[in-house]
Image: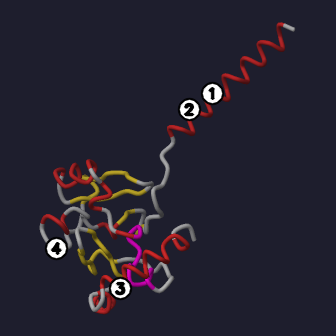
Amino acid sequence: MRGSFALARFGAAILVALAVAFAAAPTLAMPIYLEDGVAADGYDAVAYFTEGQAVKGDAKFQHAWSGAKWNFASAANRDLFAADPEKYAPQYGGFCAYGVSYGAKPKGSGEAWSIHEGKLYLNLNRAIRVLWRTDIPGYIAKAEANWPQLKDR
């Protein structure tokens, strides 16, 4: 009897430890497009907002968020992102927003970007960005409708 009580306590302790481990494990907010293991094509997601241009990030100013590595041009930009990543991260996980509006998940390029109503959107390339900019609100509406079905594919 004593042995089975000890075994039951041990089993309960293992279950509690597993529950704590899984509760502490980070969950992915969304799938992130990664190029060589880095989000946003290696570009500094904050610089689009603060400098108004695409700026390549540096791995020495890296931050991990949502299961991805994000590179920044400076420690200050890294810290801004870390404080509020959803403010700076590209929509649709950095996949091409125009493609998402058509029900696909092509890669996004850090060089083909737009900010609309305070949100960052990446496109496959600059030619696609030209198309995207012809009706950003319309494409966003389509992308928002498609994203729930696409994000987990």
Q: What element carries label 4?
A: loop
The local secondary structure at tag 2 comes to: helix
Callout 1 environment at 10 Å: few (<14), some (14 to 19), or many (20+)?
Answer: few
Q: How many labels does the image show?
A: 4
Residue in the image at 37% along x and 77% along y:
108
Q: Which tag is nearer the camera, tag 4 or tag 2?
A: 2
Q: Name the residue under label 4.
A: 53
* C-alpha span from label 3 to label 2: 44 Å
Query: In the image, which disc is placed on residue 138?
Result: 3
Magenta stretch, residue numbers: 92-101
Verify whether residue 95 appears in magenta: yes
Q: Residue furthest left?
A: 51
Q: Where is residue 127 in the image (x, y as percent from the top left)?
A: 30, 92
Residue tagged by mark 2? 20
- Cβ–Cβ below 8 Å for labels 1 and 2? yes
Q: What element carries label 3?
A: helix
When asked about the image quadrant of residue 100, the answer is bottom left
Which secondary structure lies at badge 1? Answer: helix
Q: Do the residues labelled 1 and 3 touch (CB within 8 Å)?
A: no
- Which corner quadrant of the image does residue 123 belong to? bottom left
In x, y percent, where is residue 8? 77, 19
Q: Position of residue 10 (x, y in %)?
A: 72, 19
**Three-letter amino acid code of the residue under disc 3:** Gly
Q: Earlier in the sequence, mark 1 or mark 3?
A: 1
Q: Residue drawn 42% across and 54% down?
A: 66
Report how far apart the C-alphas of labels 4 and 2 lie in the structure: 42 Å
